[in-house]
């Protein structure tokens, strides 16, 4: 079957409008979507970096800011990350590698 006619089993996840879940085409099956609560401290040099945007575009995770305090020296955020388990874990690893202090918040 030519590639154009072959039905794709897995399409890249797409972020729809704010507040909607991540959608997949898995032959009609919905993926497992998780929500993870984290507390992040961003150092001064990362405050103006678009890290939350990157979570959505690179890891297909929806970041929901639940609370924040931002000054010129530090940014402290309470975040809820929603997405597939691998994407959420990869997003958290990315934040840590960038220099963000990440603490998990128990439900």
Image (cartoon, rainbow, N blue to C red):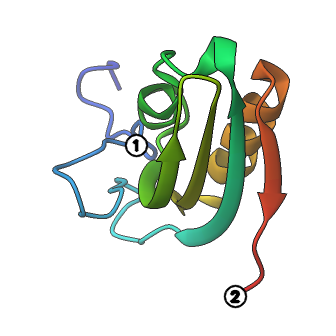
Quadrant in which residue 23 is drawn: bottom left
Q: Which residue is mark 2?
A: 107
Residue at 73% from the left image edge and 44% from the top image edge: 92
Say which of 35 and 9 sits in front. Answer: 35
**Residue name at image x 36 percent, y 56 percent:** 22
Q: Is residue 10 visible?
A: yes
Q: If you read the primary sequence from the N terminus, does the residue marked by circle 1 or circle 2 appear first?
A: 1
For this orientation, the residue located farthest to the left is: 17
CA neighbours of label 1 inside 10 A, class few (<14), some (14 to 19), many (20+): some
Residue 80 horizontal/vertical position (percent) = 53, 64
Q: Measure the alpha-carbon separation of dots 1 and 2.
A: 26 Å
Rendered location of residue 87, percent (x, y): 63, 46
- Name above or below for residue 96 compared with residue 82: above
Helix, strand or loop at mark 2 = loop
- Quick check: 84 left or right of 103? left
**Image location of residue 41, percent across then percent down:** 72, 42
Q: Report the mark closest to the observer, 1 or 2.
A: 2
Q: Is residue 98 left or right of residue 88?
A: right
What residue do we see at 73% from left, 40% from top? 90
In-front residue for pair 66/87: 66
Quadrant into which the N terminus falls: top left
Furthest toward the bottom, the residue is 107
Label ID, residue 85: none
Quadrant assignment for the C terminus: bottom right
Q: Which residue is mark 1?
A: 13
């Amino acid at each position: 079957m030519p590639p154009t006619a072959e039905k794709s089993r897995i399409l890249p996840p797409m972020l729809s409008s704010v507040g909607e879940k991540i959608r997949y085409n898995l032959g009609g099956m919905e993926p497992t979507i998780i929500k993870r609560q984290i507390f992040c401290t961003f150092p001064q040099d990362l405050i103006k970096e678009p890290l939350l945007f990157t979570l959505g575009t690179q890891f297909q995770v929806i970041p929901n800011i639940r609370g924040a305090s931002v000054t010129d020296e530090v940014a402290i955020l309470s975040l809820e990350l929603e997405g597939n388990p691998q994407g959420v874990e990869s997003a958290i690893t990315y934040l840590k590698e960038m220099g963000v202090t990440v603490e998990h918040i128990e439900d």
